[in-house]
Image (tube, helix red, strand yellow):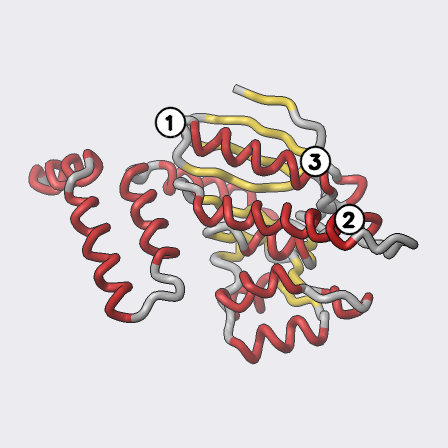
Amino acid sequence: MSATFERILYTVEGAIARITLNRPEKRNALDPQMLEELPHAFSRADEDAAVKVVALGAAGTDFCAGLDVTTLRPTADPAVFEKMRDAERLVRLFLQMRRLTKPIVALVRGRALGGGCGLATACDIILAAESAQFGYPEVRIGFVPAIVSVLLRRSVGEKKAAELMLSGRRITATEAERLGLVTFVFPDEAFERKSEEFLAELAGQGAQAMRLTKQILYQIDGLSFEAALRAAVEVNVLARLTEDFARGIEAFSRK
């Protein structure tokens, strides 16, 4: 099953929907068209009952160089509202990814910088090749990694987030894993095989259980301790009513 876009590729293989950034000649930089196409692809995956996991990868040697700088250049007319609309595209995309009912796994090779690093961080899980690099270089061109800072701050500590954004330096996949920005790092030569094994294992989990797990994981953001526990009670009860739970208990009882 496949669908045609201009800036991305979309395919479904079994229970895995694959979304591939497809501007390798621009290091997969995010332009307005790509930011319009990505939400459609995520929506298609979310609505497909056969899909249980979404894999976000990229064509070429780099994952994503961030926002296309040609869309950021100042003009004679400030066009404040137009620039706000551009920024809102990225905000809507990140919100959609957070609310998607299926886990999103980023497959990162090469560089993931600025908005590209934010795009990877917006995924639920990040798998990185050992040679991959991550960074927020916006400050070096007088810009601010404002929107992506919200995601970074939730992934690493305050002091490390400050250092990464203020210095604009790149970090290795190994350092990113140590900081909690990356989930797993695989050797370059084994990256594809290890990633496929991980995706296959995730796709073997119950769709309802994964949906509720992702729901409670992000629902507790910003809640007080007591409110988070009460939200967890609701999800706990819902989980007991699912077919996934019934099958799991039956399988466990047979052991």
Disc 2 is placed on an element classified as loop
**164 lies left or right of 127:** right
Instruction: Point out the residue furthest to the top here.
Output: 1
Question: Which label's residue is closer to the chain start, 2 or 3?
Answer: 3
Question: Which label's residue is closer to the chain start, 2 or 1?
Answer: 1
**Where, by quadrant of the figure, is residue 255 drawn?**
top left
Foreground mark, 1 or 3?
A: 1
Q: Residues within 10 Å of mark 2 (few under 14, many from 20)?
A: some
The number of numbered badges drawn on the structure is: 3
Instruction: Point out the residue furthest to the right here.
Output: 76
- Residue under label 1, please give it: 49
- Residue under label 2, please give it: 68
Disc 3 is placed on an element classified as loop
User: Which residue is at the front of the view, 83 or 120?
Assistant: 83
x and y percentages locating residue 82 in the rendered image? 75, 48
Residue lying at 38% horizontally and 37% vertically, measured from the top left: 203
**Where, by quadrant of the figure, is residue 11 drawn?**
top right
- Residue under label 3, please give it: 22
Q: Residues within 10 Å of mark 1 (few under 14, many from 20)?
A: few
- Report the Cα–Cα distance between label 2 and label 3: 14 Å
